[in-house]
Image: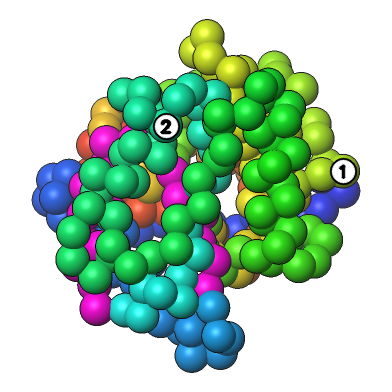
Amino acid sequence: MGDTPAATYQLKVVPGGQEQLAECAATTIASAIDLALAERERAQIALAGGTTPEAAYRHLGAAHLPWNRVDVLLGDERWVPADDPSSNALLLSRSLLAAGPGRQACFHPVPTEQDTPEASAASFAAVLARLCPGDPPVLDVVLLGLGEDGHTASLFPGTAATTVVDRPVTISEGKGLPRVTLTAPVLSAARLVVFLVSGAGKQQALQRLLDPNEPAVRTPARLVKPRSTVLILADPAAAAGLKP
């Protein structure tokens, strides 16, 4: 990934609180899905876990889209049972997929019921290949979070997952849990990449993400380098530390 040009970023600071940020994210994703479905029969999106995205998914699920033509995947998943409180699949089931039009979406969870994280990663890669033929697979929208340590998806600083470029899905570990994650080449191949960043605790990570001199080894979110401009939706608290 080091040979590819650096990403370009568009920072949009959304005034107000979490609810306004969630609404903006939902509108952005819904518009991208709409555009994708105008050009192709189906759309494929990969979503993130977290409290701010969960609020966005509730709004997104109310959008009147042909959800039966939308394949929903996860950018990463903790290797836990689907009913575990930390499961991103559970988060989606109680938000986007819980009520309204979004219930019709075609959700493809990471199969964490497999015997090992490696087996789950292989199965998820097969699902991805079926939905998005190509090398790398091209998703229409990828929504990402940004950790205080600079990680995104489950690409944590110092983990081998950050160096994987020869396959679309790999295993990782973060905060004591094994994980399955899309790799940087797949995240970078998406037609639209959106980071959702909120809270004062993310100020330094956001500064690093936007810093052209910041090494990706310290801030793996910088490994995501699509050809299109990366859209960053941030609340005022997260953006407060940025130099004008």
User: Is 21 on the left-hand or right-hand side of 127?
Assistant: left
Q: Hey, what amino acid is under mark 2?
A: Ala
Q: Which residue is mark 2?
A: 82
Label drawn at residue 178: none
Residue at point 74%, 59% (across, down) = 129
The image quadrant of residue 151 is top right
- Could one spot residue 137 in this view of the protein? yes
Write down the region rendered in magenta: 43-64
- Location of the N terminus by quadrant is top right
Q: Secondary structure at mark 2?
A: loop
Nearest the eye: 97 or 46: 97
Q: Hey, what amino acid is under mark 1?
A: Asp
Color style of the picture: rainbow
Find the residue positioned furthest to the top.
176
Nearest the eye: 130 or 185: 130
Residue at point 31%, 39% (across, down) = 91
Q: Count of labels shown? A: 2
User: Is 56 on the left-hand or right-hand side of 197?
Assistant: left
Q: Which residue is mark 1?
A: 166
Nearest the eye: 172 or 215: 172
